[in-house]
């Protein structure tokens, strides 16, 4: 069975950096599992790595579509599985890195999507119902047909509530039942999932600092440029960072207020990510706060990987800073 390494955890914990580090060490290529990094032109607010930060490691599922193009979980599955197959064919290690839990699950559990096409008219109708009656109204509707999915989804996670209702309406089968069927399928990969965590207050400090860096790097100008090309109501434009800066540009609050809202919402998002991944008992958690340096933490991650896959110990190429796995 082919090896597949996944690095998961909350935003701001350092997944991207360690993903590159481990890909360098084990002749790997990175597959992004970030639902917003698929969009072109959304660079600063999604914390995409620069070419220099990628250090020559190929990254897949980044800059796949424009912000006005919808990109479903089923499409992610199709693109990512094709990337994994190509990486394995090159004799390299696929390293899935990201914090979008559903994207991770669709790869690791081979989730079923019997009806991947989008029914835009139905989605618009459901969005209009939410606008008229509130998110709780749609959530109650979902609870009536798929209580398991409703229990897992927050009413304000409107996009996924609508998707669950769409799946049930079009197939007559609850999305939770489809997902359960997927979990019962035999595994496709020899899978190792490492979750990165740390002190909660330190993570929040890192998140606040990252937001400040985004602002300094030109996030406001990036959002302004996107609004010149795309309408503000797009799914992509509701991403963290873009929604808050749009509020500032529309005059709903000051820049300082927008920054504080963004920091608060990012901290909340990190908490939700942590809760999501904590439910997966396959994850091996590593507390980065217990190490004195990134180098020490990287060495410990390598011990976990080589303990699971001893043959990879002979593949380390980190010392000469080169990778053979090229696009």
Image (cartoon, helix red, strand yellow):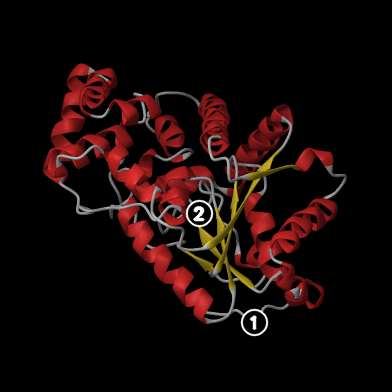
Left or right of 44 on screen, residue 110: left
Q: Position of residue 217 (x, y in %)?
A: 60, 49
Residue 36: in sight, yes or no? no
Quickly name the residue at label 2.
43
Front position in the image: 67 or 191: 191
The mark total stands at 2
The secondary structure type at the circle numbered 1 is: loop
* Residue 248 vertical position relative to residue 318 in the rendered view, above or below: above
- The residue that appears at 32% across and 43% down in the rendered structure is 235
Residue 90: in sight, yes or no? yes
Left or right of 251 on screen, residue 195: right
Q: Residue furthest right?
A: 292
User: Viewer-nearest of labels 1 and 2?
Assistant: 1
Corner quadrant of residue 167? top left
- The residue that appears at 43% across and 52% down in the rendered structure is 109
Q: Earlier along the polypeptide chain: callout 1 or callout 2?
A: 2
Tell me if mark 2 has few (under 14), some (14-19) or many (20+) residues whose alpha carbon lies within 10 angstroms of its own.
Answer: some
Front position in the image: 202 or 177: 177
* Residue 151 vertical position relative to residue 31 in the rendered view, above or below: above
Q: Position of residue 240 (x, y in %)?
A: 47, 38
The secondary structure type at the circle numbered 2 is: loop
Q: Position of residue 271 (x, y in %)?
A: 57, 30
Front position in the image: 193 or 215: 193
Instruction: Calculate the distance from the C-alpha at mark 1 to the C-alpha at mark 2.
Output: 27 Å
Quickly name the residue at label 1.
324
- The residue that appears at 27% across and 23% down in the rendered structure is 139
- The disc placed on residue 184 is none
Corner quadrant of residue 107? bottom left
Left or right of 18 on screen, residue 141: left
Q: Position of residue 27 (x, y in %)?
A: 66, 74
Tell me if mark 1 has few (under 14), some (14-19) or many (20+) residues whose alpha carbon lies within 10 angstroms of its own.
Answer: some
* Residue 228 vertical position relative to residue 26 in the rendered view, above or below: above
């Amino acid at each position: 069975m082919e090896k597949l390494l996944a690095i998961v955890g909350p935003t701001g914990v350092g997944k991207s950096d360690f993903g590159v580090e481990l890909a360098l060490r084990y002749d790997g290529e990175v597959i992004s599992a970030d639902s917003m990094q698929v969009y072109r032109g959304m660079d600063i607010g999604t914390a995409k790595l620069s070419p220099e930060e990628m250090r020559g490691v190929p990254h897949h599922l980044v800059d796949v579509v424009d912000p006005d193009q919808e990109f479903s979980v089923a499409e992610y599955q199709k693109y990512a599985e094709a990337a994994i197959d190509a990486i394995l064919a090159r004799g390299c290690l696929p390293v899935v890195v990201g914090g979008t839990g559903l994207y991770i699950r669709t790869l690791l559990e081979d989730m079923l999507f019997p009806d991947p096409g989008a029914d835009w008219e139905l989605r618009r109708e459901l969005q209009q119902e939410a606008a008229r009656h509130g998110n709780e109204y749609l959530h109650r509707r979902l609870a009536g047909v798929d209580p398991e999915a409703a229990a897992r989804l927050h009413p304000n996670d409107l996009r996924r509530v609508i998707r669950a209702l769409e799946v049930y309406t079009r197939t007559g089968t609850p999305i939770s039942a489809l997902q359960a069927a997927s979990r019962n399928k035999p595994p496709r990969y020899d899978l190792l999932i490492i979750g990165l965590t740390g002190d909660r207050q330190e993570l929040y400090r890192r998140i606040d600092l990252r937001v400040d860096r985004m602002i300094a790097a030109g996030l406001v100008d990036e959002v302004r440029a996107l609004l010149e090309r795309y309408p503000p109501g797009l799914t992509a434009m509701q991403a963290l960072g873009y929604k808050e800066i749009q509020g500032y540009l529309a005059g709903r609050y000051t820049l300082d207020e927008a920054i504080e809202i963004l920091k608060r919402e990012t901290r909340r998002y990190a908490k939700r990510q942590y809760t999501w991944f904590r439910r997966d008992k396959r994850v091996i958690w590593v507390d980065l706060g217990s190490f004195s340096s990134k180098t020490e933490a990287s060495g410990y991650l390598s011990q976990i990987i080589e303990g699971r896959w001893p043959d990879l110990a002979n593949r380390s190429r980190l010392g000469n800073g080169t990778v053979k796995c090229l696009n």
